[in-house]
Amino acid sequence: MTPKARSVFRCTECGADHPKWAGRCDVCGAWNSLVEEMAARAVASGGASRRAGGARTLAEGGSVAVTPRLRDVVGSESRRWKTGIDEFDFVLGGGIVPGSMMLIGGEPGIGKSTLLLQVAGRLQGAGHSTLYASGEESALQVKLRADRLGHDATGDVSLLSETNLETILTTATAARPAVLIVDSIQTVYTSDLEGAPGNVGQVRECAARLMRFAKESGTAVFVVGHVTRDGGIAGPKTLEHIVDTVLYFEGENSLDHRVLRAIKNRFGSVDEIGVFRMAPDGLLPVANPSELFLGDRGVHASGSAVTALIEGSRPILIEVQGLAAKAGFGTPQRVATGYDGRRLALLLAVLDKRAGLSFGQLDVFLNVVGGVRLQEPAGDLAVASALASSVYDRALPHEAVFVGEVGLGGEIRPVSQAERRLAEAANMGMTTAFLAERAVPTRIPKGLRAVGVRTIADLFERVFQ
């Protein structure tokens, strides 16, 4: 009988090993830093000699491996598997790479299981056998969701209701599926570790073994990971360095659309996004995200501005709404949704100093419509214009787009890929684009007028006078 692998509790601060868990590391004194991990295998007799000071010898417990030259490595890139869900394939970089491991993270209830069950049905229908290992839901619950999705091939997906990793890997080895889906990594455990499912040690060890299985068998592995509001110490943040691709689901539960963002991708570009709309029969891909985010701009009111962002390789138009109102009492409020609060404070200071707009007695509210996070500096000009429009209580041109970074001196700086941003603006019916004077491209899309401005003061003079 094979003896059970031994585990130790290792300090994440100093690396010291402890035979059992404790709240405080005896070596460095750090609190709550011990994580259960697999201990190194015992070394054969005579091979455990150590150097002075306790360091291991170079050849202890190892063997010499073959190291071929890169030019001698034989092989070619595998053909990707298409799921038929265009937005999902786009975010992955063109499809699923055989033998890769992908992590899909997001808050509970955001739609991860629904999307992966749709992917499983599409792959099964395309001839790629799929094994769905569910550790959170019973077989009946998964079947009810599959019936709601309505795809014919979803009923042919192999289902395994199991949380023991050894059973999942043994079943997958015997079935040899093209795709293995594990939902979720927080519920899976290995018997070699004593910790409860979901702790750091269990999550890391299970993910490492699933990765090894993917590379050795050629099976593409999807792993679901839940994210809490603060990132979750035992969630996907601890696995990002292990897997090949990290996808995050974003969106508000009150909205009917979701954004799938690629944070890491060894087989494609990062920061790509795919937009889905939540419907009764599952998640439906949105071919034109700009049309979705700008679809409700019917009211021509002050405080609204449009900007063009580059998400990965895709230009997207979004609306920024700003509201400046007289503070009711005490310190004025600064509330930003979908925008960095520190960046908002910086822009308010620039508007005060360089454009003469004082917000000292005003509450400021900023909202990026559609639940999108505005992280690119190219949206600074739209944010500043929306706030100025609210202060003056005068609407900005309805078919205008504002693209540019605002510097501390009030100058408007150019941003990358201006031509692609303007092309998307022209496709969405915009007629005027305000951007940095040095960023005006030589080739301007037909029907669009590009206006170059040097400072925010110059911009406000053109727009409001």
Image (cartoon, grey):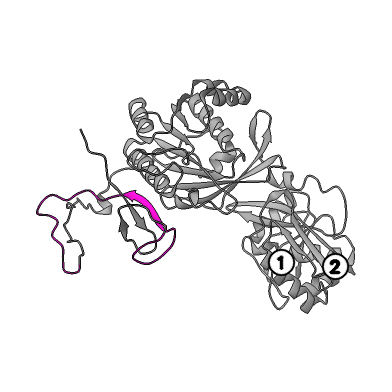
Is 21 positioned to the left or the right of 73 in the image? right
Q: Nearer the viewer, residue 73 or 292?
A: 292
Is 191 positioned to the left or the right of 460 in the image? left
- Looking at the rendered structure, the secondary structure element under dot 1 is helix
Q: Which residue is mark 1?
A: 344
Q: Which residue is mark 2?
A: 329
- For residue 389, which quarter of the picture? bottom right
Q: Residue at x 49, y 20 (%)?
A: 156
| Spatial CA span between label 1 and label 2 | 21 Å
- Indicate the amino acid at tag 1: Leu
- Indicate the amino acid at tag 2: Phe
Q: Is residue 445 visible?
A: yes
Q: Nearer the viewer, residue 30 or 102?
A: 30
- For residue 24, which quarter of the picture? bottom left
> Which label lies toward us, 1 or 2?
2
Q: Is residue 35 above or below residue 456?
A: above
Callout 2: few (<14), some (14-19), or many (20+) C-alpha neighbours within 10 Å? few
Q: Main secondary structure of the magenta part?
A: loop
State the extent of the magenta-drawn residues as a range: 24-53
Q: Is residue 442 visible?
A: no
- For residue 465, which quarter of the picture? bottom right
Residue 423 percent across, percent down from the top left: 69, 53
